[in-house]
Amino acid sequence: MGEEINDNLINTDNGSANKTNGEENGDTVGSDEKYYTLEEIRLHNMSNDTWLIINDKVYDITSFLEEHPGGEEVLLEQAGADATESFEDVGHSTDAREMLQQYYIGELHMDDRKKENTKDDVHVTNSGEYSSWTMWLIPAIAAAVVGIMYRYYVFEHKSS
């Protein structure tokens, strides 16, 4: 029953989220946590109202657009969507990641996380496992073959 109350609050006070949750640092868990659906976030894709999703956290970066070192166009391309991959690809500094916390307004709704991330997580995990064992297996096999050939060559010349 408590979940029903929280869902109603999520859907009814979208306007007050900027003031109340915008001051939080993103570490708050529990009933104070604000969850946004992808549909809600997609509505915030204008230069005067810009939200991003990075690592399942929602940020209102409207006031940061003009300050962004890469220009506001880069951020506006990702507005209202998941910018995690772009954010990680650029290789932002620790300071940039800490600065991001002041724009935190809530979390991506759990249902939307599962839809977006399930296939990607499996793909990344599997490719990571594959590359980790092949990184040591192939050189180990090559070293064993070279060792066997060396011993065979050395023993063959001693017996002649």
Image: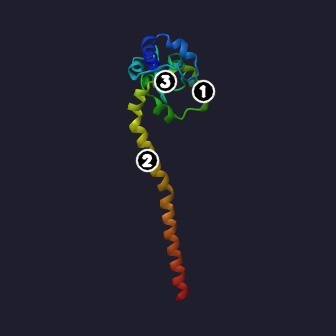
Of badges 2 and 3, the one in the foreground is: 3
Q: First in sequence: mark 2 or mark 3?
A: 3
For label 3, count other residues whose C-alpha is less than 10 Å away and answer few (under 14), some (14-19) or many (20+). Answer: many
| Left or right: 157 in relation to 39 | right
Residue nearer the viewer, 140 or 95: 140
In the picture of the structure, the residue carrying the numbered disc 1 is 98
Residue 21 percent across, percent down from the top left: 54, 16
Q: Which residue is farthest front? A: 1
Q: Residue at x 46, y 21 (%)?
A: 35
Of badges 1 and 2, the one in the foreground is: 2
Quarter of the image with the N terminus in it: top left
Residue nearer the viewer, 71 or 7: 7
Callout 1 secondary element: helix
In the picture of the structure, the residue carrying the numbered disc 3 is 107
In the picture of the structure, the residue carrying the numbered disc 2 is 127
Please say if 44 is above or below 118. Answer: above
Badges 2 and 3: C-beta atoms under 8 Å apart? Answer: no
Report the Cα–Cα distance between label 1 and label 3.
17 Å
Report the Cα–Cα distance between label 2 and label 3.
28 Å
Residue 108 percent across, percent down from the top left: 45, 25
Which amino acid does the dot numbered 2 rest on? Ser
Report the Cα–Cα distance between label 1 and label 2.
30 Å
For label 2, count other residues whose C-alpha is less than 10 Å away and answer few (under 14), some (14-19) or many (20+). Answer: few
Badges 1 and 2: C-beta atoms under 8 Å apart? Answer: no
Which amino acid does the dot numbered 1 rest on? Glu
Residue 152 percent across, percent down from the top left: 51, 79
Badge number at residue 88? none
Please say if 134 is above or below 105. Answer: below
Residue 151 percent across, percent down from the top left: 53, 77
Which amino acid does the dot numbered 3 rest on? Glu
Callout 2 secondary element: helix
